[in-house]
Amino acid sequence: MKKILLIRANRTKFGGAEIYLSRLANQLQKDNIECEIVNSIFPNFLPSWLRVLLFNFQICLRKKDGLYFSLDRISCPDIYRSGDGVHKKFLSIEKKSKFNLLHPIYLFIENRTYKNAHRIIAISNMVKNDIVSSYDVNPDKIHVVYNGINLKEVNYESSSAKIKAEFDINLEEKVILFVGSGFKRKGVDEFIQIINKLRDYKFKAFIVGKDKNLSLYKRKISALELDHKIIFTGP
C-alpha cells in the first residue's frame, strides 16, 4: 500500500479540519497504515496569497510517490476533502475586494484541485452541488461523507455543572452555543442579531472560536448592551 500523505497548510490544535486530520492520522496509525502529515513550511508573516502559492509549489512541484489526501486547495491531489466549501460560490455571495490577490489565486488553484483530484469528498450535498455547478465536475467522482463525531461516554451533568460554575450561569438560564472561527464568514453578525432579539429571555450565549477582529465584535455587543449575555471564549 502506498504511503498516505495528509496535506494541510495550517498546523493548529483547533479548527474542524485540523481536528478531523488529527483523528484520521491517529486511526490510520492504529491500523498500521503508513501516513505522514505535511504542513506548510512558510512563515505566517508572509501575505496570505503568497503563502497559498508557495504551499502549492511545496506540495506539487516535486510530488513524491504516495497517495496525496489533501484538506487544502492544491493542484495535485489524489483525494481532496472539500471541508472549506467552494470559494467561487463564497465569492458569489460575499462582496470581496478585487484588489486582494488571495481570491483570484484561490480560484485558479481551486479549479485545478477539482479537475485533477481522482476522488473528492464533500461534507454535505450542498457542497457537492456547489462543486458541480461551479466547476462542471463529474458528480460521480464526488462522495458525500458527513463529519463524524467521537462517540464516547460523557457525563453531561458533571460537564454542565462545571460550565455553570465557571461562567456563573444560573440554573434557570439556557445555554446557546456558536462554534466557528472567521466570524464574518461563519455568521457571528447574524448570531448577535438573533441574540439581541432574545435579550429578554434567561440565557447565556457562548461564541467559541477566533477572529482577527475580535475587538470589533466585542464593541458591537457592548453597544447593544449584551455584555452580560454573550461570552467570547476563544478557540
Image (tube, rainbow, N blue to C red):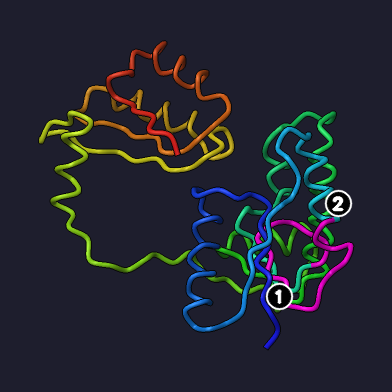
Q: Position of residue 29 (x, y in %)?
A: 52, 76
Q: What is the C-alpha distance between the residues marked 1 and 2?
A: 19 Å
Magenta residues (range) = 58-76
At a point 85% along the width and 28% down the height, the residue shown is 99
Q: Position of residue 82 (x, y in %)?
A: 65, 61
User: In the rendering, which numbered label is found on residue 119?
Assistant: 1
Amino acid under disc 1:
Arg
Indicate left or right for 193 with 20 as reference.
Answer: left
Amino acid under disc 2:
Phe
Is residue 42 positioned above or below 36 on the image? Answer: above
Residue 83 image-quadrant placement = bottom right
Within-10-Å neighbours for mark 2: few <14, some 14–19, many 20+: some
Quadrant of the image for the C terminus? top left
Kind of element beneath mark 2: helix
Kind of element beneath mark 1: strand
Is residue 118 positioned above or below 131 on the image? Answer: below
Question: In this orientation, which residue lies closer to the viewer: 178 or 161?
Answer: 161
Predominant SS of the magenta segment: loop
Going by the picture, which residue comes out furthest to the bottom? 1
Does the magenta-highlighted stretch encompass residue 71? yes
At a point 68% along the width and 55% down the height, the residue shown is 39
Quickly name the residue at label 2: 108
Does the magenta-highlighted stretch encompass residue 57? no
Q: Position of residue 120 (x, y in %)?
A: 68, 70
Do the CB atoms of the residues marked 1 and 2 lie less than 8 Å apart? no
Does label 1 or label 2 sit earlier along the sequence? 2
